[in-house]
Amino acid sequence: MSEHPNLQVMRAALKAFQSGDGPALTRLFSTDVIWRVPGKSAISKDYRGQAEVFGFFGRLMESTAGTFKVQSVDMLANDAGGVFVDRLTAERNGKKLDVRLLLHVTIRDGKIVEGTDFFHPEHQWDAFWA
């Protein structure tokens, strides 16, 4: 059985994020993508469009001096999109981050059109970015 096409998009998006491959991200994300980041921190908001979303991704790296890492635990996909299960780690201002991320993405025509982050525990995510 071959891999679901949305799983291929997800794997490619994770690889592009991890390597900082901007051109690949541009191909894999819709121009009007929406990225939802929950919580009460300064980075919690809905980001709209590639410029804002990719700016958010860049901020994660810049604010942590490149220590922000995504370790894939699992990925599940269907015709509507998929779910990433990841471990996020980083260091910033003497603080350490180690949380789980459940990321739900909607994929249309081979492009990610929406992403919604769910962090566990969310209060640790918020405290890290405070």
Image: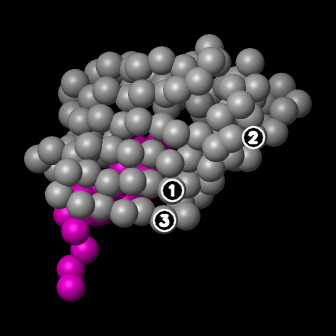
Q: Which residue is mark 2?
A: 97
Q: Residues within 10 Å of mark 1 (few under 14, many from 20)?
A: some
Q: SS at mark 2?
A: strand
Residue sticking out furthest to the left:
109
The residue positioned 27% from the left and 29% from the top of the image is 33
Furthest toward the top, the residue is 42
Q: Quadrant of the N terminus?
A: bottom left
Q: Residue at x 25, y 74 (%)?
A: 3
Give the magenta-colored segment's residue range: 1-22
Label 1 sits on what residue type?
A: Val
The tally of labels here is 3
Q: Is residue 20 above or below residue 54?
A: below
Q: Earlier in the sequence, mark 2 or mark 1?
A: 1
Image x and y of residue 77, in percent: 30, 61
Instruction: Identify the residue shown where x is 52% and y is 39%.
Output: 118
Q: Circle 1 sits on which residue?
A: 85
Q: Quick one: SS at disc 1?
A: strand
Classified by dominant secondary structure, the portion drawn in magenta counts as helix
The kind of residue on which mark 2 rests is Leu
Q: Image point 32% across, 54% down: which residue?
A: 82
- Mark 3 sits on what residue? 74
**The one of 1 and 67 positioned closer to us in this rendering:** 1
Q: Position of residue 39 (x, y in %)?
A: 59, 24
* Quarter occupied by the C terminus: top right
Q: Secondary structure at mark 3?
A: strand
Asked whether residue 31 is drawn in magenta, I would say no
Of residues 66 and 104, the one drawn nearer to the viewer in this rendering = 104
